Image (cartoon, rainbow, N blue to C red):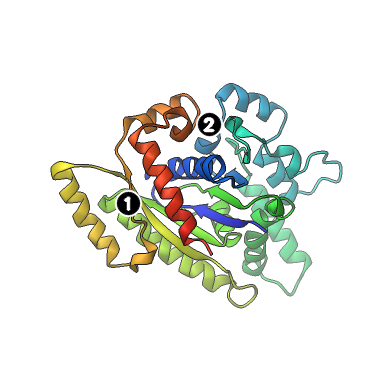
Amino acid sequence: MGLVISTVNMKGGVGKTTLTVNLATCLAKYHGKRVLVLDLDSQISATLSLMSPHEFAKTRRKRRTLSYLLNNIVQPNPYSKLDVHDIVQPYICNIEGLDLLPGDLELYDEYVVSETLHKQASIVGNLDFKTVWNHFERVLIKKIITSVIEHYDLIIMDCAPGYNLLTRSGLAASHYYLLPARPEPLSVVGIQLLERRIAKLKESHQKTDPLNLNLLGVVFISSGGGLLSRYYNRVMKRVQQDFNPYQLFDTSIPMDVNVAKAVDSFRPVVTAMPNSSGSKAFIKLTQEFLSKLP
């Protein structure tokens, strides 16, 4: 049975997707792990970091994206012909063991979800809407990964910034979560907000089905040098006050233009430019990541 890990931060632009795809690639390429990347963000950044827009367009026309699976859970269709095994793209970037469950630009209709759950609450008269919602939140992503989890060592989910339904459901289905952050004040605020939200998420499920969700660690992305480095260090010390040392990764990802350039080739930097400083940092980070797992 594989471990499920969410990469998440309330703030966008902190390197969440970069961490997800490069960590997953290193785990498959250098450590022989079977890894599934699941893109829960409608910006599809993780998807386009692993396949070209042309490939994604063909995949989407065939309805082989996460959206198909979500819609079939919200409004079950007995005539559905595809399941999660049909949607997963294997051998992504020609790397054995690295698979992708592509995201989509439109993942689900919020109105339809709300309408469906209200109907369920009215049919089962002794349940209020909050109870029905909490159950749906708990099982939505879990239903998608249940039939494939035994095929992987790790499922890594790239969650959307903020705190929408899929992010909450992804966290509820996870064993651990990773917190990528830039050593900047607003990124630190994103960490603090997320920790409060996760505490409330655990509390809301405590009575019915307690979550087995723990922080694996905070990863700092894009640390600079010189005067900027001293500023970053001050910000990082603020974070260190909120977490124990084991919850902070020693390895940080340095500023490296090659990380951004790799996105243009729709490949992770660890495959596009393996000798770059960013690539070497991700390789080192992956080793530390594995040392933190049980």
Residue 250, position as x, y percentages in the image: 33, 56
Dot 2 alpha-carbon crowd within 10 angstroms: few under 14, some 14 to 19, many 20 or more:
many
Residue for badge 2: 48
The residue positioned 66% from the left and 52% from the top of the image is 113
Number of marks in the image?
A: 2
Look at the numbered disc 1 and give the secondary structure of its residue: helix
The residue positioned 75% from the left and 42% from the top of the image is 85
Residue 167, position as x, y percentages in the image: 54, 53
Q: Amino acid at mark 2?
A: Leu
Q: Is residue 64 left or right of residue 42?
A: right
Check the image and report above or below for 79 versus 240.
above
Q: Is residue 43 visible?
A: no
Look at the numbered disc 2 and give the secondary structure of its residue: helix
**Considering the image in quadrants, where does the N terminus appear?**
bottom right
Q: Residue furthest left?
A: 227
Quadrant in the picture for residue 36:
top right
Dot 1 alpha-carbon crowd within 10 angstroms: few under 14, some 14 to 19, many 20 or more:
many
Residue 72, position as x, y percentages in the image: 75, 46
Say whether disc 2 or disc 1 marks the residue closer to the N-terminus. Answer: 2
Q: Which mark is residue 187?
A: 1
